[in-house]
Amino acid sequence: MDTGQFEHRLVAQKLVYLLKLKGVEFAYPFHLYVRGPYSPDLAREYYQHADEFSRCETASTLSSAEADSVAGLTGLFGKSPSLLEIGATYGYLAYEMHQPPQQAYRTVRRMKSFYSNEQIVKGINRAKQYLFVPTAEERAALNAELQEWQRAGIRSMRQ
């Protein structure tokens, strides 16, 4: 990570923001800017510690739950600046501003019109996948629906 490269700073901002939404404790306040959630305090820190930032070093250690959150996040988004920007913006609108999902989607499309519809859908879907924690009742409903789809698929294969 290089503080001299805009995309690296963008990736750092969006990764930290999405981790914060997932429950990892950070003291950085975020606000919505043109390129998504941004924290001037976080920016100040990575400029002050540019050497550590470039080597991705810290004196802090993550709990196993926090490490799982990081792994889940990087597994879904990698270090894709566009997907992270879209996903973090959607997360801010849906979780911080409490916009209904369809309204948050429309707002992201309007704000991020320089990205393709495919990128926007991917970024939003990955954010939802990362942030959504279904209740036991929702899991049961999803499993029932999936079983119905599986039965329909088997029936169509038999015909």
Image: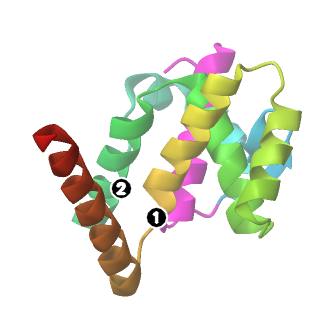
Type of amino acid at the residue the image marks with label 1 = Val
Neighbour tally class for label 1: few under 14, some 14-19, many 20 plus, Cα within 10 Å: some
Q: Nearer the viewer, mark 2 or mark 1?
A: 2
User: Viewed as shown, does residue 26 lie left or right of 100?
Assistant: left
Q: Which residues are magenta?
A: 1-27
Closer to the camera, 6 or 153? 153
What is the x, y in percent for residue 141? 37, 77
What is the x, y in percent for residue 103? 82, 56
3 over 159 or under it: above or below: above
Q: Secondary structure at mark 1?
A: loop
CA gap, disc 2 and disc 1 = 8 Å
35 over 5 or under it: above or below: below
Neighbour tally class for label 2: few under 14, some 14-19, many 20 plus, Cα within 10 Å: many
User: Is label 2 in contact with label 1 (beta carbons under 8 Å)?
Assistant: yes
Q: Residue furthest bottom?
A: 137
What is the x, y in percent for residue 109? 80, 36
